[in-house]
Each structure stands twice: as structure tokens, then as C-alpha cells.
Image (tube, rainbow, N blue to C red):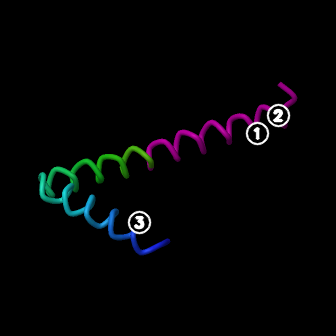
């Protein structure tokens, strides 16, 4: 990554953190929790699909 692009990203990050850092931590935590739920649902669907494929359904 070039230095100019990196500097631009750091400036954006600083602006975001100034808004309300606790709020972003909360949102990030909620997104992480959402991804975990999504992974579990996908695993459950994949397992069900593979079982159905084995049965020939």
C-alpha cells in the first residue's frame, strides 16, 4: 500500500474515532455477533443439505 493511501486511511480512521468511539465498538461487537450467528446457520443448512444429498432426497 502506498504511503499516500495509508495516510488517507489513517485520517479517515481518526475522524471516525472522534465521532463516538464507544458507539463504534458497540456496532462492531454487534456485527461480530451477527457473523457468528450467520456462520452457525450456514453450517446447519450445509449439514442438512449434505444429509439430504446422502439420502437421495
Task: Out of 25 and 39, give the one closest to the viewer.
Answer: 25
Q: Secondary structure at mark 3?
A: helix
Q: What is the span of residues highlighted in magenta in the rendered image?
A: 36-57
Marks 3 and 2 sit apart, C-alpha to C-alpha, by 48 Å
Task: Out of 43 and 26, give the one closest to the viewer.
Answer: 26
Label 2 with label 1: CB-CB less than 8 Å: yes
Marks 3 and 1 sit apart, C-alpha to C-alpha, by 45 Å
Residue 15 position, x and y percent, is 19, 57
Q: Secondary structure at mark 1?
A: helix
**Residue of label 2:** 53
Q: Earlier in the sequence, mark 3 or mark 2?
A: 3
Q: How many neighbours does mark 2 have within 10 angstroms: few (below 14), some (14-19), or many (20 or more)?
A: few
Res 57 → quadrant: top right
Of badges 3 and 2, the one in the foreground is: 3
Which residue is depicted at the point 34% across and 63% down?
9
Q: Earlier in the sequence, mark 3 or mark 1?
A: 3
Residue 17 lies, with reference to residue 26, above or below; the image says below
Residue 8 position, x and y percent, is 33, 63
What is the number of the mark on residue 50? 1
Which residue is depicted at the point 67% across and 40% down?
46
Marks 2 and 1 sit apart, C-alpha to C-alpha, by 5 Å
Which residue is depicted at the point 52% across and 45% down?
40
Task: Out of 51 and 16, give the one closest to the viewer.
Answer: 16
Which residue is depicted at the point 58% across and 41% down?
42
Residue 33 position, x and y percent, is 36, 49
Q: Is residue 54 magenta?
A: yes
> Residue most toward the right?
56
**Residue of label 3:** 5
Residue 42 relative to residue 34: left or right: right
> Residue most toward the front?
4
Amino acid at each position: 500500500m502506498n504511503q499516500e493511501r495509508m495516510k488517507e486511511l489513517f485520517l479517515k480512521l481518526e475522524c471516525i474515532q472522534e465521532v463516538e468511539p464507544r458507539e463504534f465498538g458497540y456496532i462492531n461487537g454487534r456485527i461480530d455477533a451477527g457473523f457468528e450467528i450467520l456462520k452457525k446457520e450456514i453450517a446447519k443448512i450445509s449439514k442438512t443439505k449434505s444429509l439430504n444429498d446422502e439420502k437421495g432426497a
